[in-house]
Every structure is written in C-alpha cells, then in structure tokens.
Amino acid sequence: MPEDSGHNGHHGASIELESLSKEYPGNPTPAVDNVNMEIKAGEVVILVGPSGCGKSTTLKMINRLIEPTGGRIRIGGEDVTDIDPVKLRRKVGYAIQSAGLFPHMTVAQNIALVPKMIGWSKTRIASRIEELLDLVGLDAGEFRGRYPRQLSGGQQQRVGVARALAADPPVLLMDEPFGAVDPITRDHLQDELIRLQHELHKTIVFVTHDFDEAIKLGDRIAVLREQSHIAQFDTPEAILTNPADDFVSGFVGAGAALKRLNLSRVRDVEITDYPTVTVDDPLQEIFNRLRSSGTNEILLLDKRGRPYKWLRRGDLMRARGSLARAGTLVSDTVTRDATLRDALEAVLTDNAGRVVVTGRRGEYTGVVDMETLMNSVHELLDADRLEALEAQHELEGARAERTHAEQEGEGGGMKA
C-alpha cells in the first residue's frame, strides 16, 4: 500500500477482553455478562448471534462508545479501560450500517475528520484521501467533492470504510456495515473487504446476524448466546463440521455442504479465458473473431476493459453496423475474492452457464463456468458424506465396545 511521508502503515493489534460486563440500571440481568476473548493481531473475528444477544454492545465497549461496567480491555497489550476514550477512538476505526456519513460534509471532509483532529498537515490529509478512495475502488477525481446524498448505498459504505481507515488505526470495528444494501452490492462489498484485508492486515471485529456473511469473512467466528455468552469460538470450518451444541447447529442451519461453498474462493478454482473484443473494434473484426473462436458467443469489453455485453452470432447479423442495440448486458460479475456460492448464484441468475471474473477496477480477467462450480459442490458433498460415514463407524465402534464391556461385567458378576 503506498504511504505518504511520515505515514507508517499499521498492521493489526491484538485485543483481549477480560471478564467484560455491561449492566444497565433497572435491568435485572446484565446486557453483557463476563465475556473473555482473545483476538490475534491481523485476525478477522465475527460476532454472530440472535437479535438482542449483546453482540453490538460488546463491540462498542472495545472503543468505549459504551463504557463497560466491569472487566478490562487490552489493545496491543495496553489496558485501554482507563485511557481517554477520545484518544482510544483514534486508534480504532469504526464503520456502521448505512455508513453514518455526515450529510453536510463532502466525501473528502468525511474521510479527513480524524486525521484533521490529530493534527495532520493539509498535504498529508489530501494525499491520504486520494490513497483511500483508490483503495476502496472509488475514483478520487470523481468522488472527492460529492456529498453523501449523491452516492449510492454501496458507494456510501465504501466511503464509510475509507473514513474508518483514515488515520490508519490497527483495529477496525464494523457493526453490520453492509446490512442496509442490496444483496449484489453486499456481495461486492464483502469481496472488497477481503481484498483490503489482504493488503492491510488490520485486526477486524465484525458484528452480523447473517451466518453466511460470518463464514465468508471470518478467520474465526464467535457464536454468542444471550448476554454475549460464547457458545463456540472457532474457525468457520470447525463450526460447520463440528457445531458445539444444538444452539450452534441451529445457527449453522441446513445445508452445511452448500454453506461450505462460502469457504472456497473463485481464485481456488479454474478461471478460464474467453474470446473478447472491445467496443472500439470494427464490426467485421468482431465477426471474424467470433467465427474463429469456436464458441457461439463473445464477450464485448468497454473502453476500460470492463465486461459490457455478451454477443451471439445472431446479434451480429442484426447489428447492421452498430453494436448499440446488439447483445445482452453483463448483469453480474464476481471477483477472485468472491466465494463459490456467490459465483454459483451469479451463474444461476444469468442462466447462461458462466460468470465473468473481474479485477479490482472491474476489468475482465476470465470466466468461471457451471461445470467447474458443480465439480466443487460434488467434492464438498463427497467430503461431507465421508466424514459422516467415519463418524457413524466411530459411534458404532464405541457402542459395540460399551456393549461388550457391559456383557463382560455381567459375566463377571455371575461368576462371583
């Protein structure tokens, strides 16, 4: 990640919650009761649980937006329970649902808030704004001077993440940050967060009620019961294959094999190349390329190399010198960080048996087809069946041993 002078990229810091509790006057039971958790530096930990279980309260106690009633919080080994909360919040980025941007401030002014507060120079702030907008995939020239009302929900959310990262804090807290956007935008924002994390290695604590989102994003997931009691704190794989109890099983829900598609990424499977042309290519050249490609369609890219339309032979016949009305718009794309589940949904939505894979600026990088995805599904289902079979054999073996031991015991009793 590029850095301006005097700006050192902070990687994540460890977080320790020790006997953390929150009681509200007049409530007989604590909202959060005695939570103990260790989060490693650079780890993405997801807090997931039913509505009202205290997950947001726990999150907000980490940056002391809510003051704990009892217990300690350590960030990078330093006890932050007693330091000035304003100083603490400069070390901890915070992103919430619907972005929470100030409507009367431009995008640049929103991002500059914390750097300005801690006394960064104007040139350093300006360069940081450029860098962050680029990082979250927004063109600085186009978006810097806009107001939140001039942005889509997904764009607002990207600016919210940029603002949370402005002073390069080691810790990022995210409270249902993508909860208010449509499913396709949400998938893309999740992919973006995964890509950012590959570059930044922050410590991220993320609250969601969506278990699929938890599986997709988390290095580890804490499944919380009432009062933030931890039912299970483990990797997504471990929770999917070995839920601790019925409460956790209920959260995992049906179709664990399909949920495991959230653990595999598009970059883990074969991405094939596909014949492409650009909007600047002459029609005859496009026709020749399609004829020599051996396929019955070709992908048309825009001037920036981004997928624009699928063109079939019949479309070209009807084009009559112009591609304006020809072809079918590319409705959905996935990135290399998208999950196989995202890719499968995109393929099924498109009805064409494949989905285009794009790079960080939306540029074409290849295609993933239905056959590749179905092979992955079958591999996961086979692995699940094998695991279930092994577990059954173990159970039967244990039962047989127990029965044998009981019979031995009875036999011994009779001899006596």
Image: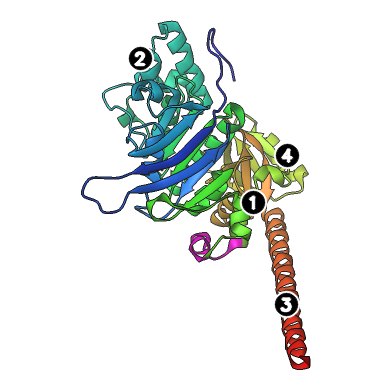
- Residue visible at 55% across and 21% down? 10
Query: The residue under label 3 is which amino acid type?
Result: Glu
Q: Could you give the CA–CA distance between mark 3 and mark 1, rounded to whole angstroms?
A: 44 Å
Q: Is residue 143 left or right of residue 24?
A: right
Are the residues flagged by discs 2 and 4 in contact, CB closer than 8 Å? no
Q: How far separated are the C-alphas under marks 1 and 4?
A: 20 Å
* Residue occupied by mark 3: 396
**Mark pair 4, 3: CA separation:** 62 Å
Q: Quadrant of residue 66?
A: top left
Left or right: residue 381 compared with residue 279: right
Left or right: 269, with 344 as reference point: right
**Which mark's residue is nearer the viewer, 2 or 4?**
2
Marks 1 and 4: CB-CB under 8 Å? no
Quarter of the figure with the N terminus: top right
Whole-percent x and y of residue 81? 39, 29
Q: Is residue 382 above or below residue 135?
A: below
Q: Report the amino acid beneath label 4.
A: Arg
333 to 147, vertically: above or below: below
Q: Which residues are magenta?
A: 246-256
- Give residue 117's mark: 2
Of labels 1 and 4, earlier in sequence is: 4
Regarding mark 2 in the picture, which secondary structure is present there?
A: helix
Nearer-the-camera pick, 292 or 150: 150
| Residue 354 marker | 1
CA gap, disc 2 and disc 4: 57 Å
- Give amino acid for label 1: Arg
Q: Residues within 10 Å of mark 3 (few under 14, many from 20)?
A: few
Give the mark nearer the N terminus: 3 vs 1. 1
Q: Position of residue 276 (x, y in %)?
A: 68, 38
Tag 3 secondary structure: helix
User: Mark 1 Cα within 10 Å, few/some/many (few <14, many 20+)?
Assistant: many
Residue to which mark 4 is pinned: 289
